[in-house]
Amino acid sequence: MKLVALCALFVSVASAKRVVISTPDAPGAIGPYSQGIMSVGSETSTLYAAGQIGLDPATGKLVDGGIVAETARAMANIEAIVSAANMTMADITECTVLMLDIDDYSDINSVYAEYFDEDAAPARAAFQVVALPGGASTEVKCIASV
Ligand SMILES: *[C@@H]1O[C@H](CO)[C@@H](O)[C@H](O)[C@H]1NC(C)=O
């Protein structure tokens, strides 16, 4: 019985297809990672999107305007990756928010909240961290599933 269960697990893992998600509407990867990886299964597909900071994909630079502008750009980048996977923001199940200064939390939330239905916002964890890449003040990373 156990062996049968193990074989079934192996078959389902082996049949999931790994699709690289890439879009010019989000910043190109600046390291050994993909903008997104979608694990396509027969029943469910899950998108693992790379953490996004407020980089403007057109310039490759951090946007000016402080925490609100950075958060807005990071969220737009996430939306671009989610769209490239043919998913929507409503498909996001879980996010992680990193910020340099916990006092920015309410400003981040005010922008973040615009992207989700308030009654069904993704599960989330948030952390204050010592440093973020590229001089960013916040980074948001999400997982979506359909
Ligand atoms: C998204 O949908 C388009 C149009 O159907 C298709 O060409 C493309 O391969 C899809 N992308 C992914 C990542 O499934």
Image (cartoon, rainbow, N blue to C red):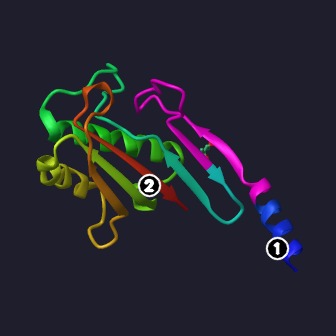
Q: CA distance from mark 2 to mark 1?
A: 34 Å
User: Does 14 appear above or below 137?
Assistant: below
The disc labelled 1 sits on which kind of residue? Ala
Name the residue at 59% across, 48% down: 38
The residue where tag 1 is placed is 5
Q: Which residues are magenta?
A: 13-38
Residue at x-position 54% and y-position 46%: 85
Looking at the rendered structure, the kind of residue marked 2 is Thr
- The reply to whether the residue tagged 2 has its Cβ within 8 angstroms of ligand 1 is no
Residue ID at (32%, 35%): 53
Query: Looking at the rendering, in which quadrant would you find the C terminus?
Result: bottom right
Q: Tell which of 83 and 27 is nearer to you.
A: 27
Q: Is residue 85 above or below residue 12?
A: above
Q: Residue at x 78, y 66 (%)?
A: 9
Measuring from the top left, give residue 104's x and y in whole percent. Answer: 14, 47
Q: Which residue is mark 2?
A: 88
